[in-house]
């Protein structure tokens, strides 16, 4: 039996009645009060997630930029110091080793926040492709990460608004933090990166400021409503970025691993596309369910905001126009769904 | 709003966390407090067809929370005579009132002697305590 890792907030989760489950080698809270109230708290006000299980890699050196440009799909030159970017680590066949956010810390120093489940794979992939003048380090154990998300998150934290995909150093109730204007919920919010030992005090401060603790269950329904892909479900080593609808993260005019294959898929058009759908009959779609018109559900759940089943899946390109009806095989029962434009849920205006 | 933990004395219980209220040659069936708590807030109930047969120990429907789907196991054999439409429309009724408004089906018993094989509340409470 593998020993599960615990974040510095483990005791806090248990005290709050969090239901702890194994996730990517970690023991994490899937919910506290319930997935639906936690989901609503993030959509309506402010929720806080412990995402300290995520990996942090630093790539540093005079040629760090050159190194990363060759392994990441997006154009790193669009990121200034103080900026951030969603990007992919791609393999030779155009598949996705991991999806991540890269932050430019200094001129020649970058922080990559990677999925917990891909921490080792991403680190080894980047380190194995190092060039002289660029050094890759896994610094995950030093830091804790709290995602504070929701329309009132900045106000509750006493932070000034800043554009999405930027970062700055800040302070919350005396605790020094890297404040990143990023997230995985589709709402306004920040991800706070702090030294591991400061995490409990920051967590307490954020709760005292009125954030609702939210678990991995709500994190999944929130990201699915706004069609953010989950690596391992919707994207992976065998799916390419173009078919996944992530062509916007691929600078096809630069050289990076797998770019030829991605140019080819783009030119020929993908056979299947990662599409979003909403159930028009009862039933909840789940990962692995066949789509009768050709394809398979990669993520499915109940949408707390729409109060019905929603999902994403790879669908034969002939059937991906919004408004097209498709049929999901829900454990042997054919149930109708309608392809919709992404995102499934559109956030309220500020 | 979730109900407080309880296992009423007048019900009989099956090890798959289903209850039965015996009323003459019929029974009302549902899932126990323990089952709904393990699942979390229910968001879907897939009921059986009226008039279909259910067999003791076999699945007759599904209940689903945001995170998980679970078969509902029949504690007794019989024929479906009623489906609780309120739970189809508002599955969270099961969380709020698992033994009252959150009932799932009524059946006409085909083998009434099966009732003797079910646990009483005391036995079921002891069984749940070991889970």
Image (cartoon, coloured by chain):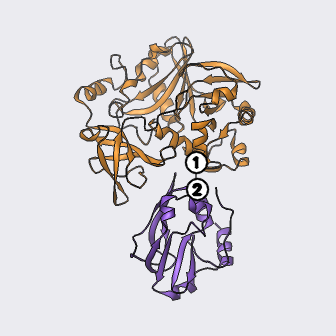
Task: Relative to A10, say whether B56 is above or below.
Answer: below
Q: Chain of mark 2?
A: B
Q: Quadrant of the N terminus of chain B?
A: bottom right
Indicate left or right for A315 with B113 as reference.
left
Work out whether disc 2 and disc 1 sit on a shared chain: no
Q: Write down the quadrant of residue A95 in the picture.
A: top left
| Residue B16 visible in rendering | no
Looking at the picture, tell me which residue is in the foreground, A76 or A312.
A312
Tell which chain the image draws in orange. A
Indicate left or right for A214 with A337 as reference.
right
Task: Relative to B74, say whether A72 is above or below.
Answer: above
Q: Which residue is mark 2?
A: B40
Residue A229 in the image, given as x and y percentages of width and height: 44, 36
Chain B palette colour: purple
**Mark 2 surroundings: few (<14), some (14-19) or many (≥20) residues within 10 A:** many
Q: Secondary structure at mark 2?
A: loop
The tag on residue A35 is 1
Q: Quadrant of the C terminus of chain B?
A: bottom right
Q: Secondary structure at mark 1?
A: helix
Residue A50 in the image, given as x and y percentages of width and height: 63, 38
The residue depicted at 53 percent of the width and 76 percent of the height is B28
């Amino acid at each position: 039996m593998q020993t599960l890792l615990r974040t510095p907030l483990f005791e806090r989760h248990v005290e709050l009645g969090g239901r702890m489950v194994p996730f990517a080698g970690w023991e994490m809270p899937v919910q506290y009060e319930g997935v639906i109230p936690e989901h609503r708290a993030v959509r309506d006000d402010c929720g806080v997630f412990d995402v300290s299980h995520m990996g942090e890699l630093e790539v540093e050196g005079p040629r760090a930029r050159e190194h990363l440009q060759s392994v990441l799909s997006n154009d790193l030159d669009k990121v200034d110091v103080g900026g951030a970017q969603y990007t992919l680590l791609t393999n030779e066949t155009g598949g996705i080793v991991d999806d991540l956010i890269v932050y430019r810390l200094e001129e020649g120093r970058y922080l990559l926040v990677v999925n917990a489940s891909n921490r080792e794979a991403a680190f080894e992939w980047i380190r194995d492709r190092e060039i002289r003048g660029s050094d890759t380090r896994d610094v995950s154990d030093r830091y804790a990460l709290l995602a504070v998300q929701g329309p009132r998150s900045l106000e509750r934290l006493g932070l000034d608004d800043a554009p999405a995909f930027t970062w700055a150093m800040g302070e919350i109730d005396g605790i020094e933090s890297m404040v990143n204007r990023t997230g995985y919920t589709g709402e306004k919010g920040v991800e706070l990166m702090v030294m591991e030992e400061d995490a409990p005090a920051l967590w307490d401060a954020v709760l005292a400021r009125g954030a609702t603790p939210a678990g991995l269950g709500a994190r999944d329904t929130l990201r699915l409503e706004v069609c953010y892909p989950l690596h391992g479900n919707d994207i992976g080593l065998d799916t390419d970025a173009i078919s996944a609808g992530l062509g916007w993260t691929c600078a096809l005019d630069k050289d990076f691993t797998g770019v030829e294959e991605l140019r080819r898929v783009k030119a020929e058009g993908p056979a299947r596309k990662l599409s979003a759908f909403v159930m028009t009959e009862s039933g909840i779609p789940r990962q692995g369910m066949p789509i009768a018109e050709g394809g398979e559900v990669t993520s499915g759940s109940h949408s707390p905001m729409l109060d019905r089943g929603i999902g994403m899946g790879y669908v034969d390109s002939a059937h991906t126009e919004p408004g097209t009806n498709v049929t999901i095989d829900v454990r042997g029962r054919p149930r109708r769904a309608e392809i919709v434009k992404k995102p499934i849920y559109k956030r309220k205006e500020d | 709003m979730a109900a407080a933990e309880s296992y009423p004395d007048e019900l009989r219980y099956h090890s798959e966390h289903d209850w039965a209220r015996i009323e003459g040659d019929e029974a009302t069936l549902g899932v126990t407090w323990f089952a709904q708590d393990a699942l979390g807030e229910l968001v879907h109930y897939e009921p059986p067809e009226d008039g279909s047969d259910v067999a003791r120990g076999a699945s007759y429907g599904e209940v689903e929370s945001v995170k998980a789907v679970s078969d509902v196991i029949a504690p007794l054999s019989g024929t479906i005579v009623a489906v609780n439409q309120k739970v189809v429309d508002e599955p969270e009724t099961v969380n709020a009132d698992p033994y009252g408004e959150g009932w799932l089906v009524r059946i006409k018993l085909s083998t009434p002697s099966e009732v003797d094989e079910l646990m009483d509340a005391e036995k079921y409470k002891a069984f749940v305590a070991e889970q």
